[in-house]
Amino acid sequence: MTKMHRYSWLVCFAVPAAYASVLPRQGQPRFRPSPNSGFDDPTVNIASPAFGTAIAEGYQGPFASGYETSLVGPANLLRSGTLQIGVKSNYTLPLYNSINAKGGQYWWVTTDSSDEGNAAQLGINFSPKLRFAAQSLSPDSMSPAEDVRVVNNTVVGRQGMVDYSPVRNIVPGNGTFSFPPQMAQPGQVGDNNYTPLIRLANAGGEVWNAPIVAGDVNDHYLNQFCNGVPEDMQEGFYSKVHDRVLAICPRESTVTLACVNGFSFSKSVLYFALDASDTLPATLDDVNYAPRLANLQVGGDDSLFSGVERFFVSTNGFSNKDLASGAPNNETHHPWRQGLSSAINGDGDPLNILGAIPTVALDYSPLWNFNLFSWTDYSIEAGIRTRMTGEFEVLGMAAAGYVTSPDGSQLETQNIVTTIVLKLSTTNVFGHRSSMVLRVTTARR
Ligand SMILES: *[C@@H]1O[C@H](CO)[C@@H](O)[C@H](O)[C@H]1NC(C)=O
Ligand SMILES: *[C@@H]1O[C@H](CO)[C@@H](O)[C@H](O)[C@H]1NC(C)=O
Ligand SMILES: *[C@@H]1O[C@H](CO)[C@@H](O)[C@H](O)[C@H]1NC(C)=O
Ligand SMILES: *[C@@H]1O[C@H](CO)[C@@H](O)[C@H](O)[C@H]1NC(C)=O
């Protein structure tokens, strides 16, 4: 696959990778994750550091990340809203309404800015690299960031819009793996002008990640969905609103988005994804297809003027169906499951491996440049295939030849980008989260 894809995401939440020991000490209760408690897959969700010790849960000092966010423990990145932790976590953040260049209204959120001061003030993620996302591929071609103006405290002149009427359709691959799918049609399609990135031409010229989440629909209609979307109204709702929206409430100026689990440098990360530059990831992640993001220069990783950050996506990791029966605690999750085939099979998120996020490095960008990788037949047959949780594990496996690009050639950056919003927990959530994090033996390495 040499097609180039670009993707943009937001990251939610960074917590230590949770490798709960499955075998408890004698006399201690087994670790049995209950879906109601927010635990589902014990190898992804966070367990208590008291597990396997003689101390009671909670009998520990506060998390070091409360003192210094780069230390181990949950840390908030996105602070503009509230994280609700569950088997399927979600995040509620401010919702904005504006009038587009043709006079129609649209609804949007903002999650990242190239302006450090405003990012800190609004509790969104600061990404210095976003400035360079305004460059184009030739002097007269379209920039991946649309120029808009700020008038009366809102954005005016936005041209790119998203059509929410298509119905997402994905037909799994029929070979050994479900990836690549035989067919993938996104559920939301941006026009040629649409990009989640806006540049405030008359207000500092900074670039903001400002994805659209609903089309030309009025607040009266949307206010019906302040507490969620009833099953019998979903078809109508999702023909007007982004598929990752779980609730939307103009009267309270909020929207609730579904979060995705992943990893960054062995920490567990929650994020949300709203846009992708290619129909395949746009369908897989159920996000806006944003063709204009394909004008982004990729491949530069952390070099001068690069606007992107890399992330690593497995195509053929283990799937839950590979788990032999008789697993401890009747566990149904393969502890090493990962990748797009597993996700297409319905196991859950693909557990992608992000490069830098704030607290880990300075080069965070919400524009994630796909690096698809596949385990070789040799790795699969020899039992080398495993779950990876950090960029350098993937690069090491690639250098040694255990993983390659999907076509068997050496691992390389694909020209696809997705935007990911990183969200780390809020103070509220911190309290709630801490009871979950208290279940990992390895939480305080
Ligand atoms: C958000 O997540 C929480 C915790 O799992 C859940 O109780 C709530 O219903 C979710 N909200 C929506 C709108 O789905
Ligand atoms: C901005 O506000 C002024 C005064 O309320 C109003 O006259 C004008 O139409 C507004 N402009 C836009 C673009 O909304
Ligand atoms: C898989 O699908 C392709 C076309 O979509 C078809 O040609 C092929 O025969 C199918 N293979 C199997 C094993 O069903
Ligand atoms: C596993 O499932 C079986 C059959 O439902 C049940 O009898 C057994 O108690 C379960 N074991 C555990 C550890 O939950």
Image (cartoon, rainbow, N blue to C red):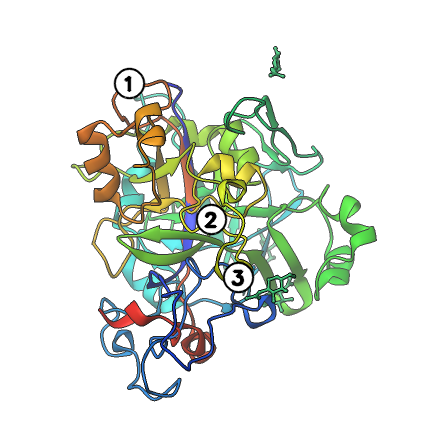
> Vertical placement of 437 versus 129: above or below?
below
Dot 1 and dot 3 residues touching (CB under 8 Å) = no
Q: Where ligand 2 lies, by quadrant?
A: bottom right
In percent of width and height, residue 105 lies at: 65, 47
Spatial CA span between label 1 and label 2: 28 Å
Q: Quadrant of the N terminus?
A: top left
Task: Say which label, 1 or 2, has the lower sequence index.
Answer: 2
In percent of width and height, residue 154 lies at: 52, 55
Q: Is residue 87 left or right of residue 435?
A: right
Classify residue 337 by image quadrant. Answer: top left
Secondary structure of the residue carrying numbered label 1: loop
Identify which residue is drawn at 59% across, 22% down.
174
Secondary structure of the residue carrying numbered label 3: loop
Q: Which residue is mark 2?
A: 334
Q: How many marks?
A: 3
Q: Which residue is mark 3?
A: 40
